[in-house]
Image (cartoon, coloured by chain):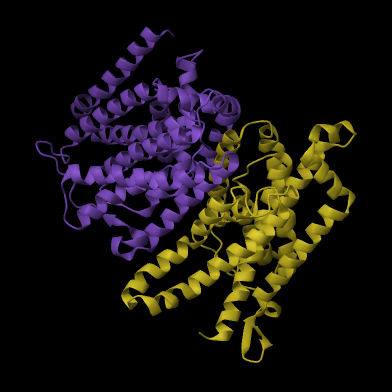
Chain colours: A yellow, B purple
Amino acid sequence: MNFFLVLEQTLNGLQLGVMLFLMAAGLTLVFGIMNLMNLAHGSFYMVGAYLATYFYQVTGSYLLGVLLGLAGTLAVGVAVELVALRTLYERDHLDQVLATFGLILFFNELAAMIWGRAALYTDIPDYLSGHVDLLPGLRYPLYRLVIIVVGLAVAALLWFVVARTRLGMLIRAGASNRAMVAALGVNIRLLYTLVFGFGAALAGLAGLMAGPIHVVQPGMGELILIEVFVVIVIGGIGSIRGALAGALIVGMVDTLGRAFLKPTLATVLSPTAADAAGPALASMLIYLLMAVVLALKPQGLFPARL
Amino acid sequence: MNPRNRAIALALGLLLLAAVPPIASLFNQPFYLDLLRRIMIFAIAAASLNLILGYGGMISFGHAAYLGVGGYAVGVLAHYGVYDGFLQWSLAIGASALVALVIGAVSIRTSGVYFIMITLAFTQMLYYLGISIEEFGGDDGMRLAVRSRFPGLDLSDANAFYYLVLAVLVLVLFLGHRLVNSRFGLVIRAARSNEARTRAVGVSPYPYRLAAFVIAGAVCGLAGALLVNHTGYLTPEFMNWTRSGELMFMVILGGIGSLAGPVLGAFALLVLEDLLSGWTEHWQLILGPLLVLSVLFFRRGLAGLFFPKNE
């Protein structure tokens, strides 16, 4: 097996990993703090992708598209929290799942109504396209590299905010005892709305970065959302550290599995058997990994709260 | 409503269902026969989910998996030229029970949101498995050219098939009723209300929950076998996660933890979908908020309207 190919696929796995982390971070924060199970988190991913694509086409500037897309997703997130989800914090998880399922239907159909059901292909601006030479002989797409850098930077920023700032202190306090924080005079409702909005914006960021790599279409959010669930189950729910570890593990396993499982199987099995079993097994790999982790550690790898 | 009136209401409902084929043929509206058959098949699936969701408190977001497994059991046997109904449906039930055993054994160890996410993830895994098997059509699925064959019963006769589905529905509801009110059902319900106390009186909920999970999976597998015979084709979409969500909504809309609830819920949701989709292409834009509103304000479901003060 080619060493450069392995390195390239590892970078792809890292890129998928940071993307999953951006999604998982918002979801796990919202769950850890508001005890809210939000299926519609995938919708913010889709909203981010559509808005950024739309604003890029309208303004002609990629950077402006990204910024407006982020702001738009933030606004949509805040609106959803204020209109629908605020009343759900006190409800049980079943009600939360059902209500947010209804929201998914709404958002997917809305996107289909505005932009059509066909997939939207977006291109990246010239200064982000092309390849860079990481090592002699290893050329890697610049855009994917940017995604990795942005993702890791956001992860570091998130850690800083949660662990080192006053806002983060309030967030952590709200997670462990909301009544006490409210009694101390903190506007906990506003805090919740803020956290929810920024969680949505993180999902939107993942979506708008994924847009040019995958396709932008209604329902795109749910496919990644279920992988994000796997990430959270593996990492331990409510834990940012767990979300990062889980995201990187899932990103790597999924990418490397898809790239190398078939050729590896071909060395053991007949080519036809490997042809049949390889893709099937590769698509199931992360779920099997989840089952193994659950069997060994039912609370995930990093069950700590925040 | 007292138990006697409740029994009368149930009997009336079943009589109405039984009267559909002659009425549909009288007015020459075979469409309604088709719609109600579909509703009853989903009612069977929803009733099986109600056993674990309503009575057992296990929020399974992956119940469509067993529709798929049951459907593929029939489809795969037919693909290899085995049309015997008893064989096909036994495999559908057995395979779904086995899959439910594996998924349940892992996921029932956890609870709360973990359980929701894990059941959803496993179903997604089966969905991708269905997509990646080229032999059985992959993404496109396959056609079921020949319906299951039973001696003395022709499923291509729409009325005969309808009454068979009705009979299965009645049987499932009856057995579900017996099961829920048995000692086994008592443990399941007790574990939902208070797990710690259930343990304290010396009963470990795990094996009971797992058994209920497997029973629910097996019954839903049977519904899958019926569904593939109904539609005449089979795709991984049988296992799509939105299917699981729809099944949950049927249980909730109908009224959680009541016998007739899933039937009412299946009826309400599928008729609503049918009406809305006949009205506008973007019917989900209306259905979605309606569902959100029903969760927020209509908590006891349709059964709550008919049977107030239900246990």
- A150 lies left or right of B7: right
Pick the residue in front: B260 or B22. B260
When asked about the image quadrant of residue B35, the answer is: top left
Q: Where residue B9 sits: x, y (%)?
A: 35, 14
Left or right side of B49 for B146: left
A265 relative to B42, above or below: below
> Seen from this angle, which residue lies furthest bottom?
A136
Q: Is residue A76 left or right of residue B129?
A: right
Identify which residue, A178 or B279, lies in the foreground: A178
The part of the image, by quadrant, that contains residue B140 is bottom left
Residue at x 78% of width, y 40% of height? A176
In this rendering, does residue B59 appear at all? yes
Q: Can see residue B269?
A: no
Q: In the shown orientation, is residue B137 left or right of residue B2? A: left
From the viewer's side, name the closer residue of A212 and A199: A199
Q: Position of residue B84 (x, y in %)?
A: 15, 46
Residue in the foreground of this view, choosing between B111 and B41:
B111
Residue sitting farthest toward the front: B202
Task: Identify the image quadrant of residue B86.
Answer: top left
Q: State the image coordinates of residue A209 (x, y, percent, origin top left).
A: 65, 65
- Residue drawn at the location 41% of the way across and 64% of the way down: A280
The picture places residue B90, in percent across and down from the top left corner, at: 24, 43
